[in-house]
Amino acid sequence: MANVLDVLVERGFVKDISDERGLRAALETPITLYIGFDPTASSLHAGNLLSIMVLAWMQRLGHRPIALVGGGTGLVGDPTGRTTGRPMLACEQIEDNLAGQRAQLARYLDFSEGRAMMVNNAEWLTKLNYIEFLRDIGVHFSVNQMLATETYKTKLASEAGLSFLEFNYALLQAYDFLHLYQEFGCILQMGGSDQWANSLAGADLIRKVEGGRAYVVVTPLITTASGAKMGKSQSDSVWLDADRTSPYQFYQYWINTEDPDVERFLALYTFLPMEEVRRLGQLEGSELRKAKEVLAFEATRLTHGEEAAKEALAASHALFGGDAGSMEGVPTTQMAAGELAEGIPASQLLAQVGLASSRGEARRLIQQGGAYVNGERIETVEQTITPNNLVEGSLFLRVGKKKYHRVVVA
C-alpha cells in the first residue's frame, strides 16, 4: 500500500507539513486523523470538497478519518480571515446545520464498523469548567505568541477589533486536538492553510500535556486560473445540497472549468488514477471538452450519485451538444396554461425562474442582447412570452451562453 503522503503530494493536496519525516514514518501503519468543518450552514459547498477528498483518500489508503463538526466552536465563531465578527448562531440552528452536513459527508466516507467517525465538539467543549480549563489548558499558551499570528493581527487592526470571545477560539481548537488524541489516538490534524497556526498550537499542546507526538498537514488555498475563489459561481456558493444547487447546476459548474485548471482539478476532485489525469490534461482545443466532461461527471457522481450525474450529462448534451438527449436534469419550472394565456413580459419571466435576480436586471440583460427564448434573442424589454412561443408544450430561456431554464406549461 502506498504511503498516503506521497499520494496527497502528487495530487496537489499538500502545502505545509509540520514534521514530514516523523509523519511519513507514522503513516506506515494505520493512524487516526481529523479535519474540522464549520457548522454555519446546513450544507457544505464546493469549497469544502478539498478537505472532504483528503479524508476520503486517507480512508481509501487504510487510515481512520474523523470529521469533526464544530457545534461547540460554532458557538464562538472562527475569526480566521475576517475583519468583522461572525454572526452568533443559536444551538438549535447549529444542530439543524450539522444534520445536513452529516448526510453529505456520508457520501464520501464509509462510517460503517468504525472505519470513519463523525464527532461534534459541543459534546466536550460545552461541558468544560472555565477555571479548570484556564489552569489546565490556558497556562500553556503565550498571549504574545498568539497576538503575533496573522489572524489576530488582522483582527486587532480592524475597526471592530478583537473580542475576548474570538481570542479564545485558538485555545478551543487546540483543545479539540488534545481531546481527540486522548480519546481516539488521533495524531494528525489536517485542514486549510489558514488554520496552520491554530493546528500547530494543538500539536504543541499534546506535547506539553501528554508528551505525545502529533502532526499537522495543511492544504493550499485553491483558486481558479482567473483568481476566483473555489466553490463560487457568479458570486453564489456552489452547494452540495441538491435543493440549493441542483445536480445539473453542479455539473455545469465543473464543465465550465477554465482550461488551465482542468488537469489540476481532475487530480484534486476525482479518484481517477494520475496516469488518466495526465492523459486528459494533455488534451487540447475541442478535445479538452472531453476532459471537462469527465471532471464534471465524476464530481457530480461523487456528490449526487450515478443517476443524477447521467441526467446532468444527458441534459448538457441536449442543450449544448445538439443531441436529442434527456431534459430531466435541466432546471425546470412548471407553469399553468392560464398564466401564459395573455402573455408574460419576458423580463418578468426571466426573474420569475431565477435567471435574473430582479426585473431590473432582466431588462438590462435584454438591452445588452444577452437573453433568449428558444434560441432567439429577446429584442426589446417590452417583448412578451405567449403560447405562440411554446414548442411541444415548453419553452427554453437562456441568459448568456451557459445559463438555461426550461418552462413546461400544463
Image (tube, rainbow, N blue to C red):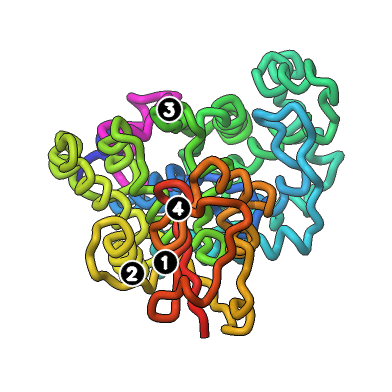
**Residue position for label 2:** 311
The mark that comes first in sequence, 1 or 4, is 1
Look at the image and say whether residue 338 sits in the magenta stretch: no
Marks 1/4: CA distance?
Answer: 20 Å
Marks 3/4: CA distance?
Answer: 29 Å
The residue sitting at 78% across, 31% down in the picture is 84
Q: Are marks 3 and 1 in contact (CB under 8 Å)?
A: no
The mark that comes first in sequence, 3 or 1, is 3
Marks 3/2: CA distance?
Answer: 29 Å
Closer to the camera: disc 1 or disc 2? Answer: 1
The mark that comes first in sequence, 2 or 4, is 2
The residue sitting at 45% across, 58% down in the picture is 404
Q: Nearer the viewer, residue 97 or 55?
A: 97
Marks 1/2: CA distance?
Answer: 8 Å
Task: Identify the element where label 2 is drawn.
Answer: helix
Q: Are marks 1 and 4 in contact (CB under 8 Å)?
A: no
**Residue position for label 3:** 226
Q: Which mark is residue 392?
A: none
Closer to the camera: disc 2 or disc 4? Answer: 4
**Residue position for label 4:** 377
The amino acid marked with disc number 1 is Val
Instruction: From the viewer's perspective, tell me whether residue 72 is left or right of residue 369.
Output: right
Task: Identify the element where label 4 is drawn.
Answer: strand
How many neighbours does mark 4 have within 10 angstroms: few (below 14), some (14-19), or many (20 or more)? some
Residue 229 at what x, y percent from top left? 51, 34
Closer to the camera: disc 1 or disc 4? Answer: 4
The residue sitting at 48% across, 33% down in the picture is 214
How many neighbours does mark 2 have within 10 angstroms: few (below 14), some (14-19), or many (20 or more)? many
Q: Nearer the viewer, residue 408 or 129?
A: 408
Read off the magenta span: 8-32
